[in-house]
Image (cartoon, grey):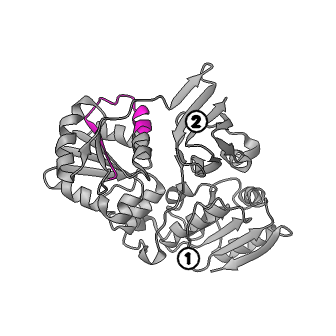
């Protein structure tokens, strides 16, 4: 049987349970596996699974499932929620985004290896497969939660309401940008004419909204199809367990063209997409600098980080490649300065060429005063 496996979350990869699951299923089947999100890809690299998991696609879980519907006989969503209820709610939301959830047998393996783990068949054709897989894993088969419409579009498409389940205190991210923090387990994002205007069950972060809509450009966002995430963007894992990726599939694009730099502006989730072919990077935002810097350190890519001390605590720890420098500006000025760097040094684009890292560094520092308070070299 041809089985497509969509892995979501880093805990499964860090713990080794994803590898055990793939080994179990590969015995009698032909499996194809993908992992969702930049952090998932990094976790797969750290686990040495580049050869077994497709790291090249950048699709949301629902889109990954639909892609497997086209080629596989059975599709499995492998997930580990912090709690069983949150994992089941996640599966419910993913399934709600599918055009046709009955296209192929679809099941979810939730929290494998834990006493409360479940195998959830999401359509009629999946029940027989769920029972067999549950027997192999020592889990229970559980009925799926009642379907819910996580996205509601009204007013002739002008108003979008999108619901999500999370933990109070968790950050809410839209397309990788923190737009607020949850104050309730149930959060609803509301947009009008493509602009996020309200967050029920949470507090909106004004700076995040400005970044999401690209400040004065006022770029609308399709909330119904945007990538919405909650919690921490990075994962807790000690640095000494993070090997370099010198032998990974990403090495084909590295080192990049001499002098090519990219700017990563409050979008650490896109780091792997943006760094292909780059020699160094400018990162804008405290969390973006920590997360992107840690990711890029695996490839030996130094960064010039622009921060102002306003951290959302998405990252637990960070490491930087030798040659990196992190600038600390006065509070509230990293966004403004990042836009200036992009406009004046990158001509408003995401990539540009420079003679060397040092020449870029000097150009950035020259623009900074009097807002620059200090900088740290690595």
Regarding residue 294, the answer to whether it shows in the image is yes
Residue 148 sits above or below residue 362 on the image = above
The structure residue drawn at horizontal position 52% and vertical position 72%, both measured from the top left corner, is 297
Which stretch appears magenta? 92-111
The structure residue drawn at horizontal position 59% and vertical position 54%, both measured from the top left corner, is 267
* Percent of width and height locating residue 344: 76, 59
- The quarter of the picture where residue 317 lies is bottom right
Residue 128 sits above or below residue 334 on the image = above
Spot the residue most to the left. 28
Residue labelled with disc 2: 223
| Separation of residues labelled 2 and 1 (CA atoms) | 35 Å
Disc 2 and disc 1 in contact, CB within 8 angstroms:
no
Residue 371 sits above or below residue 146 on the image = below
* Percent of width and height locating residue 355: 65, 73
Q: Does the magenta stretch include residue 101?
A: yes
Q: Which numbered marker is on residue 321? A: 1
Q: Nearer the viewer, residue 314 or 262?
A: 314
- The quarter of the picture where residue 262 lies is bottom right
Spot the residue most to the top. 156
Screen quadrant of the N terminus: top left
């Amino acid at each position: 049987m041809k089985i497509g496996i969509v892995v979501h979350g880093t805990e499964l990869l860090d713990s080794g349970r994803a590898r055990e699951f793939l080994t179990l299923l590969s015995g009698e089947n032909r499996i194809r596996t993908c992992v969702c999100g930049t952090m998932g890809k990094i976790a797969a690299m750290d686990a040495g699974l580049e050869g077994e998991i497709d790291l090249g696609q950048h699709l949301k879980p629902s889109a990954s499932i639909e892609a497997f519907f086209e080629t596989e006989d059975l599709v499995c969503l492998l997930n580990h929620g912090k709690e069983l209820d949150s994992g089941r709610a996640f599966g419910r939301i993913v399934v709600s985004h599918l055009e046709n959830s009955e296209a192929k047998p679809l099941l979810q393996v939730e929290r494998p290896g834990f006493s409360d783990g479940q195998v959830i068949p999401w359509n009629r054709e999946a029940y027989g497969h769920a029972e067999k897989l549950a027997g192999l894993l020592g889990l229970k088969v559980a009925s799926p939660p009642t379907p819910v419409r996580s996205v509601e579009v009204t007013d002739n498409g002008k108003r979008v309401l999108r619901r999500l389940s999370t933990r109070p205190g968790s950050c809410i991210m839209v397309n990788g940008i923190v737009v607020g923090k949850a104050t309730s387990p149930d959060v609803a994002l509301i947009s009008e004419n493509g602009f996020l205007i309200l967050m029920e069950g949470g507090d909106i972060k004004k700076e995040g909204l400005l970044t999401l809509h690209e400040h004065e450009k006022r770029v609308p966002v399709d909330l119904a199809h945007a990538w919405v995430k909650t919690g921490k963007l990075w994962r807790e894992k000690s640095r000494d367990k993070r090997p370099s990726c010198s032998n990974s599939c990403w090495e084909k694009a590295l080192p990049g063209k001499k002098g090519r730099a990219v700017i990563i502006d409050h979008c650490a989730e896109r780091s792997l997409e943006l760094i292909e072919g780059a020699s160094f990077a400018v990162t804008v935002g405290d969390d973006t600098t920590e997360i992107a810097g840690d990711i890029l350190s695996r490839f030996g890519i130094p960064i010039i980080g622009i921060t102002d001390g306003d951290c959302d605590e998405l990252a637990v720890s960070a490491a930087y490649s030798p040659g990196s420098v992190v600038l600390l500006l006065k509070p509230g000025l990293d966004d403004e300065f990042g836009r200036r760097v992009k406009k004046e040094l990158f001509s408003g684009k995401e990539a540009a060429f420079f003679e060397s890292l040092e020449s870029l560094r000097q150009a950035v520092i020259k623009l900074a005063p009097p807002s620059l308070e200090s900088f740290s070299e690595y």
